[in-house]
Amino acid sequence: MRIFHRSRRFSSALWVLLAAALTVAPAAAQDAVSGTFSFAGKTYKLTHVNVSRQPLMTDNSKIVFVVLLTDNPIPAKVLNDRFRLELTDLAREGKFHGVSVTIGADRKPVGTSWNYAKEFGGAMITRADQHTFEAKALDDSHAEGQLFGQGSIGDDKWDYSASCKTALTTSK
């Protein structure tokens, strides 16, 4: 009888731990992005977002937020790389299309940003003044707001507009 009682207590504790784990796990399901990226008459639906908090490339004493909006998922090993050099290769192979924008502590685009598409040969560098971020929230744990931008490369125009909400990752 005593063994049965201990077994039930253990089982109850296990269920409590499992319920707690399941409550924490779906946080990523709350991440959301809605928008489009267009280049030379082709439009791609933006369905994935990743925002990382990291030191500014040119001044490690300053922290920036790098927002990546894409039409397809990006492998975690690429997202976890601070420099994300493989993004150009993946875009060149046509595996995704999207935009990466660096946001400063003042909630404005800063430095250089990137547009990714096979049509660009992988990646095209863009200026901060070609992007706008309207923040609802931007802190050490999450980002929420609207991003949009436009420009051209030769005679071909590009533009994007997206709303996003996501938890942040940290890159060193």
Image (cartoon, rainbow, N blue to C red):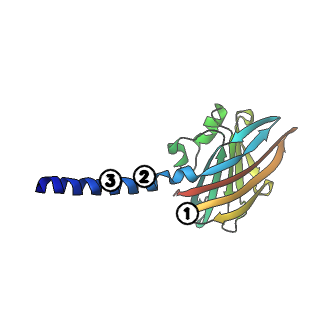
Q: Amino acid at mark 1?
A: Ser
Crowding at mark 2 (Cα within 10 Å: few <14, some 14-19, many 20+): few
70 horizontally vs 153: left or right: left
- In the image, which disc is placed on residue 22? 2
Q: Which residue is mark 1?
A: 141
* Image quarter in which the N terminus is found: bottom left
Mark 2 to mark 3 CA distance (whole Å): 10 Å
Q: Residue at x 61, y 41 (%)?
A: 87
Sooner in the amino-acid sequence: mark 2 or mark 3: 3
Sooner in the amino-acid sequence: mark 3 or mark 1: 3
In the structure shown, which secondary structural element does the residue marked by tag 2 occupy?
helix
The image position of residue 47, as x and y in percent, is 65, 43
Q: Amino acid at mark 2?
A: Leu
The image position of residue 88, as x and y in percent, is 64, 39
Q: Residue at x 64, y 64 (%)?
A: 138
Say if 70 sits above or below 148 in the image: above
Discs 3/1, front: 3
In the structure shown, which secondary structural element does the residue marked by tag 1 occupy?
loop
Say if 137 sits above or below 75 in the image: below
Residue located farthest toward the top when viewing the structure as drawn: 93
In the rendered image, is residue 117 in sight? yes
Q: Residue at x 75, y 42 (%)?
A: 37
